[in-house]
Amino acid sequence: MGEYSKALEYYEKANKIYETSLPPTHPDLATAYNNIGGVYYNMGEYSKALSYLEKALDIFRMSLPSTHPHIKS
């Protein structure tokens, strides 16, 4: 719907909760980073998107098997 700033606001609120309540390698935390990265990508802020997407991928690589679809190349 194009309401990226509103989506970003809620994703960032959720991410703060995840960061305080989940271990740093939890897949849900990676999903939160991935969601935020996706919003930045859709807004055209590619360097911010890349930063969040790389964080997500790092966590996925640590917490999921190498054959998982989220990290399989």
Image: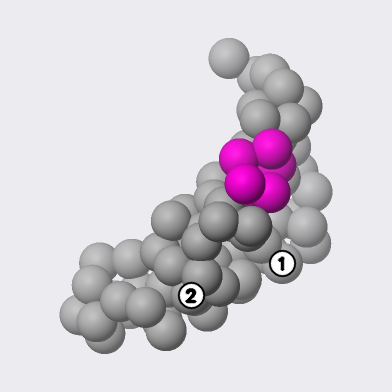
Q: Residue at position x 44%, y 67% from top?
A: 26
As drawn, is 23 to the left or to the right of 64? right
Q: Residue at position x 78%, y 57% from top?
A: 48
Q: In the image, is residue 18 above or below residue 62?
A: above
Q: Main secondary structure of the magenta part?
A: helix
Residue 11 x, y percent position in the rendering: 63, 38
**Please, what secondary structure does the residue beneath circle 1 have?**
helix
Viewer-closest of 50 and 27: 27
As drawn, is 65 to the left or to the right of 51? left
Q: Which image quarter holds the N terminus?
A: top right
Q: Residue at position x 24%, y 82% from top?
A: 65
In the rendered structure, which amino acid carries the disc numbered 2?
Thr
For disc 2, the marked residue is 25
For disc 1, the marked residue is 51
Q: In the image, is residue 19 above or below residue 60?
A: above
In the rendered structure, which amino acid carries the disc numbered 1?
Ser
User: Mark 1 Cα within 10 Å, few/some/many (few <14, many 20+)?
Assistant: some
**Please, what secondary structure does the residue beneath circle 2 have?**
loop
Residue 36 x, y percent position in the rendering: 63, 47
Residue 28 x, y percent position in the rendering: 43, 56
Viewer-closest of 58 and 16: 16
User: What range is drawn magenta here?
Assistant: 12-17
